[in-house]
Amino acid sequence: MASPSSPQAAAGTQPASFGRRFGALLVDWAVATVIASLLVDDLRANPWPQLGVFVLAHAFFVGLFGQTLGMAVARIRCVSIVDGGAVGLPRAIVRALLLALVIPAVINDGDGRGLHDRAARSVMVQRA
């Protein structure tokens, strides 16, 4: 049985697998690339808009709705370990910025949560 402070107990579901999380990330990055390509002439000369669009969209959608388009496709959600709801904009911004740095996302704990999830007090879970 999960302890009351564990991510599984807070979310009431199973943690999302690495494959689902990575697939969602690829979809979100592709969408950010398309949107950023509409904003600048050449992403090869200026790749920063792509990262900016990714971070802003990720923070907005995760903060308010608990999932991005990629997460919806992969049938996963990002929820608060406190109450199982959306993490809110401030915590989602922290999570998105750390995700953009990549390294915090690849350092995982025993529950499979990256440093970006630990900082935001969130967990990625599978949707039913």
Image (cartoon, rainbow, N blue to C red):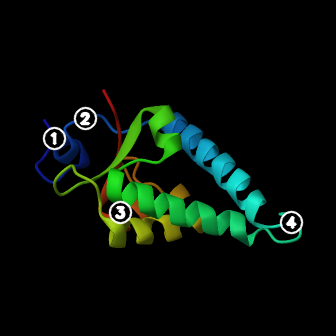
Residue at horizontal 18%, vertical 58%? 82
* Residue 67 appears left or right of 73: left
Front position in the image: 123 or 93: 93
Quadrant position of residue 59: bottom left
Disc 4 marks which residue?
A: 41
Q: Secondary structure at mark 4?
A: loop
Circle 1 crowding by C-alpha within 10 Å: few under 14, some 14–19, many from 20: few
Q: Secondary structure at mark 3?
A: helix
Residue at horizontal 40%, vertical 55%? 62
Q: Nearer the viewer, mark 4 or mark 2?
A: 4
Real-space CA distance between mark 1 and mark 4, rounded to the nearest whole angstrom: 51 Å
Quarter holding the C terminus?
Answer: top left
- Badge 4 amino acid: Asp
Quarter holding the N terminus?
Answer: top left
Disc 2 marks which residue?
A: 13
- Badge 2 amino acid: Thr
Q: Secondary structure at mark 2?
A: loop
- Badge 3 amino acid: Arg
Residue found at the very far front of the displayed protein: 38
Of callouts 3 and 4, the N-terminal one:
4
Q: How far from the left and from the top, in percent, is residue 32?
A: 65, 55
Circle 2 crowding by C-alpha within 10 Å: few under 14, some 14–19, many from 20: some
Disc 1 marks which residue?
A: 2
Real-space CA distance between mark 4 and mark 2, rounded to the nearest whole angstrom: 43 Å
Q: How far from the left and from the top, in percent, is residue 63?
A: 36, 60
Of callouts 2 and 3, the N-terminal one:
2
Circle 4 crowding by C-alpha within 10 Å: few under 14, some 14–19, many from 20: few
Disc 3 marks which residue?
A: 118
